């Protein structure tokens, strides 16, 4: 007696254990190494930007500019660790981040520099409060 296809080809289980199909998220940025391997990136999920590193969510934000800043910071950290990467971003991500920058009265590059300076100051304050 032949075995049904559903018994021959089991469905993949999701992290929660259900057998629902896994929903793919549209990628809007990638971090790739010299060998072309994707190490991370940014996806958009329900108006929320999701930073993904090694296939796992690392951070979320509703700000496209912040998502780009996080991606750039990750690229710097990887380069400092001896693994230089190249970042590429979609037009959608760049456009939304540029719109945020314009609302703040800045160019995109000025806005990303501002966000990085804000991160450094926040890290410095957090480090000072731990001492």
Image (cartoon, rainbow, N blue to C red):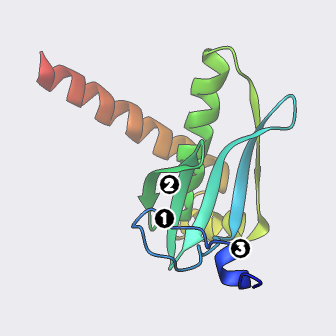
Q: Is residue 78 above or below residue 21?
A: above
The residue positioned 64% from the left and 33% from the top of the image is 75
The residue that mark 3 highlights is 8
User: Residue 48 or 103: which is nearer the viewer?
Assistant: 48
Element class at badge 3: helix
Q: Is residue 78 left or right of residue 19?
A: right
Q: Earlier in the sequence, mark 3 or mark 2?
A: 3
**Viewer-proximal residue among 129 and 86:** 86
Residue 27 image offset from top left, x and y in percent: 70, 63
Callout 2 secondary element: helix
Q: Position of residue 130 (x, y in %)?
A: 13, 22
Q: Are marks 3 and 2 in contact (CB under 8 Å)?
A: no
> Which image quadrant is residue 25 in?
bottom right
Q: Nearer the viewer, residue 26 or 3?
A: 3
Q: Position of residue 40 (x, y in %)?
A: 65, 45
Residue tagged 1:
63
Q: Mark on residue 66?
A: 2
Q: CA distance from mark 2 to mark 1?
A: 5 Å
Q: Are marks 2 and 1 in contact (CB under 8 Å)?
A: yes
Query: Residue 28: which quarter of the image?
Result: bottom right
Of the 4 image quadrants, the one containing the C terminus is top left
* Helix, strand or loop status at disc 1: loop
Quadrant where the N terminus is found in the figure: bottom right
Which residue is located at x 52 percent, y 60 percent? 50
Q: Nearer the viewer, residue 50 or 124?
A: 50
Above or below for 85 versus 56: above
Mark 1 or mark 3, whichever is nearer to me:
3
Q: Is residue 35 above or below residue 61?
A: above
């Amino acid at each position: 007696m032949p075995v049904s296809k559903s018994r021959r080809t089991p469905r993949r289980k999701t992290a929660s254990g259900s057998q629902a199909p896994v929903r793919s998220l549209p990628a809007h940025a990638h971090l790739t190494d010299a060998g072309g391997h994707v190490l991370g990136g940014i996806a958009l999920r329900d108006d929320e930007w999701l930073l993904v590193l090694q296939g796992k969510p690392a951070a979320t934000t509703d700000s496209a500019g912040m998502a780009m800043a996080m991606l750039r910071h990750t690229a710097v950290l990887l380069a400092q660790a001896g693994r230089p990467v190249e970042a590429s971003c979609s037009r959608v991500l760049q456009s939304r981040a540029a719109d945020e920058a314009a609302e703040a009265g800045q160019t995109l590059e000025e806005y990303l520099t501002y966000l990085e300076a804000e991160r450094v100051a926040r890290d410095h304050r957090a480090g000072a409060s731990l001492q």
